[in-house]
Image (cartoon, grey):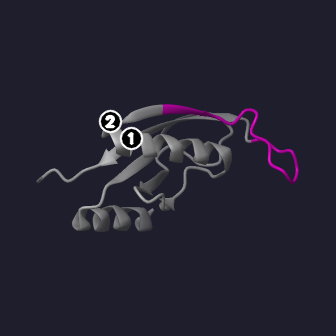
């Protein structure tokens, strides 16, 4: 988590646009808990994780929209049918993820 906060601070210092994705609610079995964060830069680079796999790809895509519009978004990531290639396992849960643009308040 420290790496995520340090990257947020550096992005603000450099004046770079980023989106912050935060798990705000979970139901069932999920790969990460409430409070887990991922940063998504305009160039697509990420820091941190909200769980990986297809759900994280959905978060990344929505983060690009948040960066384009400047408007936060709350999405539901349904992992009930998210199977992995190797073993057919699924997490079996649902995560609500808030995606917000990271902005400096002094500008």
Whole-angstrom CA distance, mark 2 to mark 1, is 5 Å
User: Is residue 85 shown left or right of residue 26?
Assistant: right
Q: Which residues are magenta?
A: 75-90
Residue name at image x 63 percent, y 52 percent: 52
Looking at the figure, which quarter contains the N terminus?
bottom left
**Dot 1 corresponds to which residue?**
66
Q: Which residue is mark 2?
A: 71
Q: Is residue 72 left or right of residue 94?
A: left
Q: Residue at x 35, y 36 (%)?
A: 72
Q: Residue at x 88, y 50 (%)?
A: 87
Q: Secondary structure at mark 1?
A: helix
**Toward the viewer: 23 or 105?**
105
Q: Are marks 2 and 1 in contact (CB under 8 Å)?
A: yes
Q: Which element carries disc 2, helix, strand or loop?
A: loop
50 up-or-down from 74: above or below: below
Lateral position of residue 68 relative to residue 40, left or right: left
In the image, residue 86 lies in the stretch drawn in magenta: yes
Q: Position of residue 33 (x, y in %)?
A: 56, 46
Look at the image and say whether residue 103 sits in the magenta stretch: no
Estimate the x, y position of residue 69 in percent, counting from the top left. 33, 38
> Measured along the vertical axis of the image, is residue 4 above or below residue 38?
below
Q: Which mark is residue 104?
A: none
Residue furthest to the left in view is 106
Mark toward the start of the polypeptide (2 vs 1): 1
- Percent across and percent down for residue 99 are 42, 41
């Amino acid at each position: 988590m420290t790496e995520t906060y340090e990257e947020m601070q550096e992005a603000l210092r450099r004046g770079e646009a980023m989106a912050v994705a935060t798990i705000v609610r979970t139901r069932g079995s999920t790969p990460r808990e409430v409070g887990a964060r991922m940063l998504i830069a305009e160039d697509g680079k990420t820091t941190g994780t909200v769980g990986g796999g297809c759900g994280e790809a959905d978060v990344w895509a929505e983060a690009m929209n948040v960066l384009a519009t400047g408007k936060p978004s709350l999405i539901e990531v349904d992992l009930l049918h998210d199977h992995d290639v190797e073993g057919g396992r699924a997490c079996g849960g649902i995560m609500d993820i808030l995606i917000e643009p990271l902005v400096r308040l002094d500008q």
